[in-house]
Image (spheres, rainbow, N blue to C red):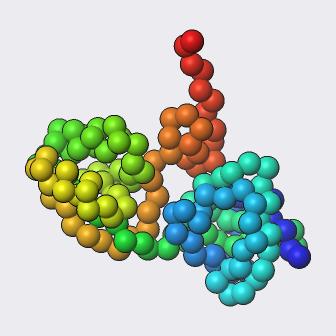
Amino acid sequence: MIEAGTIIERGAWERPAADTITLDEAQRHRRRMAMVSDGGIAFLLDLPEAHRLREGDAILLSDGRLLEVRAKPEPLVAVSGQGAAHLLALAWQIGNRHLPCQIEADRLLLRRDHVVEAMLRELGAQVEPVEAAFDPEGGAYGGTHGGHHHPHHGHD
């Protein structure tokens, strides 16, 4: 079986990809798994540690081919506020609940959850269902964003 043990971050690869692999956000956070590209190339992803694959990254196969990672649209909600300060306050509420969140200039994207959506509406947010690729922020401790790991230096 073809293996893949290297991820090349978006913007760092130049030659054409042999195929694509389209995955939702949960499927893009992997360490080891049998996978099949969109065109049918079967391979074993075998990374040294779990990695968040991002839209535009490339998976380097053991035979030298590249597979371009594409983010599959999924059911989300777009959250907007009544100005920048309100949007920041809404982001704080979401972060306080440890919910995965994609932060954009004028909106936040979250997985659909009727309880969270009701809470955000109560706080004055506009909440609209959308289908979009989901690329949430990585966590401060152990979450990877762009493949970089930042260790936690706690104060005990």
Quadrant location, the C terminus: top right
Q: Name the residue rendered at 64%, 78% in the picture.
A: 20
* Number of marks present in the image shown: 0
Which of the pair 64/77 is nearer the observer? 77
Residue 87 appears left or right of 22: left
Asked which quadrant contains residue 84, the reply is top left
Q: Name the residue rendered at 51%, 63% in the picture.
A: 25
Residue 129 vertical placement versus 147 (above, below):
below
Residue 146: x %, y % from top left? 58, 49
Which of the pair 84/140 is nearer the observer? 140
Residue 17: x %, y % from top left? 69, 75
Q: Name the residue rendered at 51%, 35% in the picture.
A: 140
Quadrant location, the N terminus: bottom right
Outermost residue to the top: 156
Residue 26 appears left or right of 61: left
Residue 33: x %, y % from top left? 74, 66
Residue 88 vertical placement versus 106 (above, below):
above
Residue 138 vertical placement versus 74 (above, below):
above
Q: Residue 16, can we see it?
A: no
Residue 43: x %, y % from top left? 79, 74
Q: Residue 140, can we see it?
A: yes
Asked which quadrant contains residue 77, the reply is bottom left
Outermost residue to the front: 115
Residue 140 appears left or right of 46: left
Q: Name the residue rendered at 58%, 45% in the picture.
A: 144
